[in-house]
Image: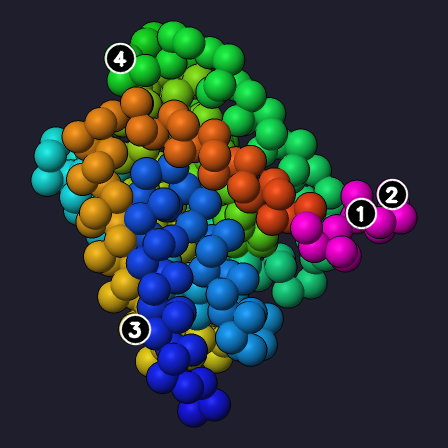
Amino acid sequence: MADLTVQVIAFLVVAAFVAGFIDSIAGGGGMIALPALLIAGVPPLETLGTAKLQSLFGSGSASLAYARRGHVHLRTQLPLAVISAAGAAVGALAATVMPAYLLRLILPFLLIAIALFFAVKPDIDDSERARKIGAFAFAATLVPAIGFYDGIFGPGTGSFFMLALVTLAGFGVLKATAHTKVLNFGSNLGSFVVFAVSGAVLWKLGLMMGAGQFLGAQLGSRLAIRSGARIIKPMLILSCVALTTRLLADPTHPIRVWAGF
């Protein structure tokens, strides 16, 4: 923190604001915050821990904004958030001993599949549909599994929660977005605790970026509430495509290594 200039800190706060704005609508804020921290020279482990701290403010801010407008009831969703947090904590612990090579390999294909699903399904809007999975089964399987993924790797977590809530829980797009933020807050909290205990958090920087995340998420969630699926669907598709592009731009990505470019 002492090595960062005022200009670099300002850049990181602005990056956090943009990340909070995008994440509150469609997820994918990590593709902005994580590279920004690495560009600023923050070591990889501290980047992960600090990113989780600042993202708590974004997901928490968006959750409050959606709750105030009645799109999610925080008290009834608390058990699911706790389950998501537990899954993420286990994932964060596993990340210390388990290589993320396989996840990095398959993630671009999963993200493109999600983008195509929302792009070609014209009937996906803010209206609700019949559930295809019981509430208990959803809470016992998908919530901890996606939380685990967030803890061990992270990018695209919001997109996975959105897909599960829309296709299996029968939620409309706006309601799914609101509930995604609560579940994402839980997974952020669970993995953050693990990183904090291990000392991998730059607290002052994380809190300053958290302020940017909070404001960005407030603005983004209000736009999403006002426009619903009209803004959320294209933003979700764009977020998945952009995150895929960002992953494949890394020269060390397994696909690029195998292809020899």
Q: Which residue is mark 4?
A: 127
Q: Which residue is mark 1?
A: 256
- Check residue 259 in the rendering and tell me which mark sits there, or answer none: 2
Q: Which residue is mark 3?
A: 208
The amino acid beneath tag 4 is Ser
Q: For numbered disc 3, what is the local secondary structure?
A: helix
The residue range painted magenta reads: 249-261
Residue 188 as seen in the image, left or right of residue 58: right
**Colour scheme used in the picture?**
rainbow
Circle 4/circle 3 CB separation < 8 Å: no
User: Is 83 placed above or below 41 here?
Assistant: above
The amino acid beneath tag 3 is Met
The amino acid beneath tag 2 is Ala
Residue 240: percent from the left, percent from the top?
A: 52, 36
Residue 10: percent from the left, percent from the top?
A: 34, 74
User: Is 9 placed above or below 86 here?
Assistant: below
Circle 1/circle 2 CB separation < 8 Å: yes
Circle 2/circle 4 CB separation < 8 Å: no
- How far apart in space, not on screen, are marks 1 and 2 (Cα)? 5 Å
Along the line of sight, the residue nearer the viewer: 106 or 8: 8
- How far apart in space, not on screen, are marks 2 and 4 (Cα)? 43 Å
- How far apart in space, not on screen, are marks 1 and 3 (Cα)? 35 Å
Residue 67 visible to an observer of this rendering? yes
Q: Nearer the viewer, mark 1 or mark 3?
A: 1
